[in-house]
Image (cartoon, rainbow, N blue to C red):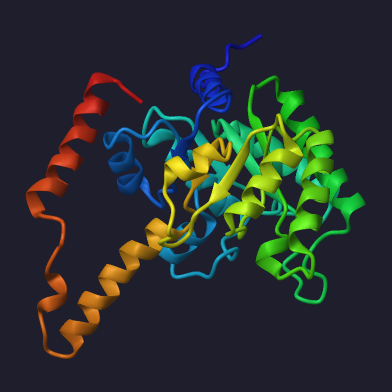
Amino acid sequence: MNQDPFAARRAAFRKLHRSGCFVIPNPWDVGSAHALSVLGFKALATTSSGFAWSRAQMDHEPDLEAVLAYLRDMVQASGLPVNADFEHGHSDTVAGVQENVRRCVQTGVAGLSLEDSTGDAAQPLFDLDEAVARMRAARQAIDATGADVMLIGRAECFLVGHDNALDESIRRLQAYSQAGADCLYAPGVARLEDIEAIVRAVAPRPVNVLVGQAVPFDVAALARLGVRRISVGGALAGAAWGGFLRAARGLAEGRFDGLAGKAEHGELNQLARSRQEQLARGDP
């Protein structure tokens, strides 16, 4: 049997989920991934929205081949474990999810998130039985590869405005856990009491919380609730675009004040230099 070249990263990623709380930020290109690794983060996660915006596309618009190429770039950008935002598996069928997850694992990711949204405003979530079948197919696909890749089950109830988002999220996340998800995730949950309820309901499975904007609590507060990991989705990309658009609009109006606070030329060159030095040493 061929040895898994990403086994160490995958083992490190699983270990991060066993205790404590860690932040897993979301880069959208090689430069942002390298910068985050230099800053000392222990793992990275991709962002479907940040990647799409970098291509002048809407979130969920890039096709499977583009997403797989992005995942390969992110895996190669540092030696850190990478969690793939694999959206709804890029297929409307269970068989398609299974095949696409197999291909996702081949990119070298240490984890992948599968969500239960359909993209259809008339029926924004897959029926629970179908969503569970899709999660089980993803689990089977991962296991068939022999790679120790974590499966993250996402319930999109809060994001689609479900009438009973908390209870429905818990019901779905518990079912996804039974179907083989290693970590659970309800993006859009914002109230600390709701987060705590989800953590309790799916214990001992680890829970990911998405923080997509400035909030009146910090990492320590989420850690006290038992949250195991914290991601930011497209928020870092949005922050970068926010700075860019403020500066560009100022230029369009004849002003230069938007350039205040920019990253300095030397700092960015040093980041690039450190990446080239890594590559010269043969580091991932």
Instruction: Identify the residue at image location x=64%, y=22%.
Output: 148
Q: Which quadrant would the C terminus be assigned to in this image?
A: top left
Along the horizontal axis of the image, is 104 left or right of 96?
left
- Residue at 58% x, 11% y: name it: 3
Q: Is residue 153 above or below residue 158?
A: above
Residue extending farthest left:
266
Q: Quadrant of residue 136?
A: top right
x, y (%) of residue 122? 81, 76
Q: Where is residue 98? Give x, y as percent.
A: 78, 40
Q: Residue furthest bottom?
A: 253
Please state if 137 lies on the left or on the right of 85 as rendered.
Answer: right
Q: How many marks?
A: 0
Q: In this rendering, would 195 be left or right of 175?
A: left
Q: In the image, what residue occupies the spot 50% across and 21% down?
A: 12
Where residue 221 appears, x then y in whole percent?
47, 44
- Which quadrant does the N terminus fall into? top right
Considering every residue shown, the one lying at the far right of the view is 129
Name the one closer to the observer, 82 or 209: 209
Q: Return the x and y of residue 73 as percentages of the image width and height.
A: 43, 41
Left or right of residue 199, residue 122 in this image: right
Q: Quadrant of residue 261?
A: bottom left
**Residue placed most toward the observer, 267 or 147:** 267
In this view, the residue in front, 65 or 19, is 19
Q: Nearer the viewer, residue 180 or 79?
A: 180
